Image: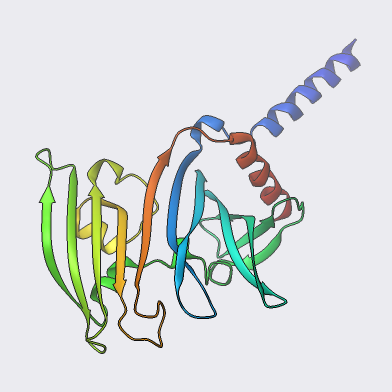
């Protein structure tokens, strides 16, 4: 009886130890970031329709999971083909690397964070730098709600080096979203004391040999808080990450 009791105690202690490493579903926070851009024809520079990329960012303590749904265009036998791919990136905020997981694959690929996200829009967007660096912004209007929670602003921007290129931007801020870790422009969040959560950028390109062939090239960003999501999916990739690192 003593031996059986010891086994039960041992198994119970192992179970407790295992559970100690399981993420608490209720403590996983999530946001959704949307990026819309024109569908560019690489042959003649014209645009037709839009492509939408969506990123989900989940956070549990100091662990971040990025789920990136990417639409892509490729050229095969002189024909344009379209596809969609989902990748997951998991990282500890205190470490300089991430593990990349392609959908349907178990093994991850260890990469430096800078290398993994070098060309990823969700990290590389820099609204403040776009507004200030080499550009001259002129405020068109600014409207703040009576309760001071929201702010809408619009700027007309000219380029210091290419005066025939201009842009119009529309920004929307919300104070109640300041506790969201992700940012479209940390400097602007700090200046306005509100979270920049919507950005619409319209580039007026008047040069025939550049992107858009003289058309307006419009992009759109939006941050949304997410309350309902597949928590088990997030836990699965956190478990994979903990097993590999």
- Picture quadrant of residue 73: bottom right
The residue under the point 37% across, 52% down is: 222
- Residue sitting at x 12%, y 66%: 139
Count of marks overlaid on the render: 0
Most distant residue in the left direction? 146
Q: Is residue 61 above or below residue 22?
A: below
Q: Quadrant of residue 4?
A: top right
Residue 52 in the image: x percent, y percent?
49, 56
Position of residue 212 relative to residue 105, above or below, is below
Residue 217: x and y in percent read 36, 70
Left/right of residue 153 with respect to residue 118 in the rendered view:
left
73 vs 3: above or below: below
Q: Quadrant of residue 155?
A: bottom left
Left or right of 37 in this view: 164: left
Please state if 57 lies on the left or on the right of 103 as rendered. Answer: left
Relative image position of residue 46 (x, y in whole percent):
45, 75
Identify which residue, 230 or 34, lies in the foreground.
34
Color scheme of the displayed model: rainbow
Q: Which residue is found at the position 51% from the left and 37% from the top?
A: 28
């Amino acid at each position: 009886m003593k031996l059986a009791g010891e086994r039960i105690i041992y198994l119970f202690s192992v179970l407790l130890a295992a559970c100690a490493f399981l993420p608490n579903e209720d403590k996983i926070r999530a946001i959704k970031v949307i990026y819309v851009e024109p569908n560019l024809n690489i042959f003649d520079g014209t645009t037709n329709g839009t492509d939408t990329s969506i990123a989900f960012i989940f956070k549990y303590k100091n662990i971040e999971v990025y789920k990136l749904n990417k639409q892509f265009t490729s050229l095969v036998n002189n024909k344009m083909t379209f596809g969609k791919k989902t990748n997951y990136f998991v990282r500890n905020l205190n470490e300089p690397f991430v593990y990349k997981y392609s959908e349907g694959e178990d093994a991850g690929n260890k990469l430096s964070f800078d290398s993994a996200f070098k060309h990823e829009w969700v990290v590389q967007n820099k609204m403040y730098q776009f507004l200030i660096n080499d550009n001259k912004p002129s405020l068109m209007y600014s409207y703040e709600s009576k309760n001071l929670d929201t702010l809408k602003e619009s700027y007309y921007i000219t380029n210091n080096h290419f005066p025939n290129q201009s842009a119009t931007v529309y920004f929307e801020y919300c104070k109640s979203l300041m506790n969201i870790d992700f940012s479209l422009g940390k400097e602007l969040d700090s200046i306005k004391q509100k979270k920049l959560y919507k950005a619409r950028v319209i580039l007026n390109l008047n040069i025939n040999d550049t992107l858009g062939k003289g058309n307006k090239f419009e992009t759109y960003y939006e941050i949304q808080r997410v309350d309902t999501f597949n928590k088990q999916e997030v836990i699965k990739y956190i478990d994979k990450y903990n097993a590999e690192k």
